[in-house]
Image (spheres, coloured by chain):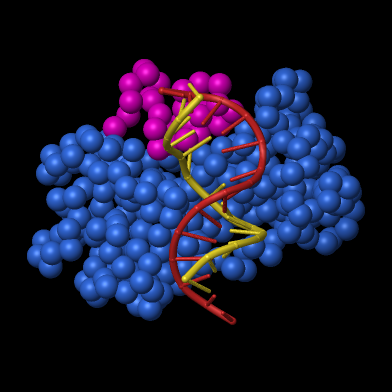
Chain colours: A blue, B yellow, C red
Amino acid sequence: MPELPEVEVLARHLAPRLKDKVILDVEIRRARVLRPTPPKQLRKTLRGARFAGLTRRGKYLVFTLRAAGGRKMLDLLGHLGMSGRMYLQPSAASLPKHAALVLRLGQESFIFEDPRYFGRLTLDASVISALGPEPLGDGFTSDYLANALKRSAQAVKVKLLDQSIVAGVGNIYASEALFRAGIPPRLASRRLRRRQVEQLWRSVREVLARAIRLGSTLGLDWAGTGNNDGIFYYGRDASGQEFFEERLQVYDRAGKPCYRCQAPIKRIVQGGRSTFYCPHCQRNGDAKTSVDGSGVDL
DNA sequence: CACCATGTTCCTTG
DNA sequence: CCAAGGAACATGGT
């Protein structure tokens, strides 16, 4: 379930529930997700530690813990990969099939499950330093983006997925942001005009901010027992209806009519990943390409 | 059976 | 040295 908005909503959800909880025991069921931390070290470090804070950086969760007994603080890094989930459940409940790691907190247990085991929960925080600025933070300006794009011949869509340029944009919101900005995904990033960079910069922020807002109001079922399993790309509301208040405009809509112009949405492959776009709304003409250039709306 | 999937990392090629 | 492309990771859904 991962991209910046989902991770952000998850962090907000978990933070107050984990605060001050003590890790009584650690069950490692798939050591692969700890990489590169050795299981023994993780167990020793976490046992007796107390949750102090939870933040997000890019698509990573950063759990801050106070080490057992001492005043030493440590960071535990979480990443959901493609299919990961993290949630609390009653300790007596049975574990999901693909539980990778369980932290026993008393009445409740913290579960990290991930069918594909691409996700991570590790003491190695080195990856964080390679991340670009937070798209919703002050470090991400249109000047910064212009500079980051200006020398590369790589397609702008591929560039948006580069976590060292901006942290947290994934395959879904990259397509969404380009649609909103009216920019063709195959355009070489160095070919963007200044106005397009500006629109892209704004669109990235708007698309992510809207998704966070949507996810914050859904009443998600983090354990995945119901319809709303914490993924809010797709999903249904309480009555089983697909909720569709202006959600995804192009992603996974190949062949369906563009909401803006009715032209069929196209799917192409870039860097081995699907890209969806509207061939009519996202042309490189100079004129009125922006789908929505109005309010900043954060 | 075939193909697709929200992500990252490693290896090869140019 | 760097940029770009592709495979690998592992499982499930359609």
Residue C3 lies, with reference to residue A12, above or below; the image says below
Residue with the most extreme left position: A287
Q: Nearer the viewer, residue A168 or A25?
A: A168
Quadrant containing the C terminus of chain A in the rendered view:
bottom left
The answer to whether A248 appears left or right of A103 in the picture is left
**Start-end of magenta stretch:** A218-244
Tell me the residue at 75%/25% (across/down). A91
Q: Could you tell me if residue A141 is visible in this image?
A: no
Is residue A257 inside the magenta stretch? no
In the displayed structure, would residue A236 be above or below residue A216? above
Locate residue A24 relative to residue A177 in the image: left or right. right
| Residue A231 is at least partly visible in this image | yes
Magenta span has A231?
yes
Q: Position of residue A163 (x, y in %)?
A: 50, 62
Report the predominant secondary structure element of the magenta stretch: loop
The image position of residue B1, as x and y in percent, is: 50, 24
Q: Position of residue A246 (x, y in %)?
A: 26, 39
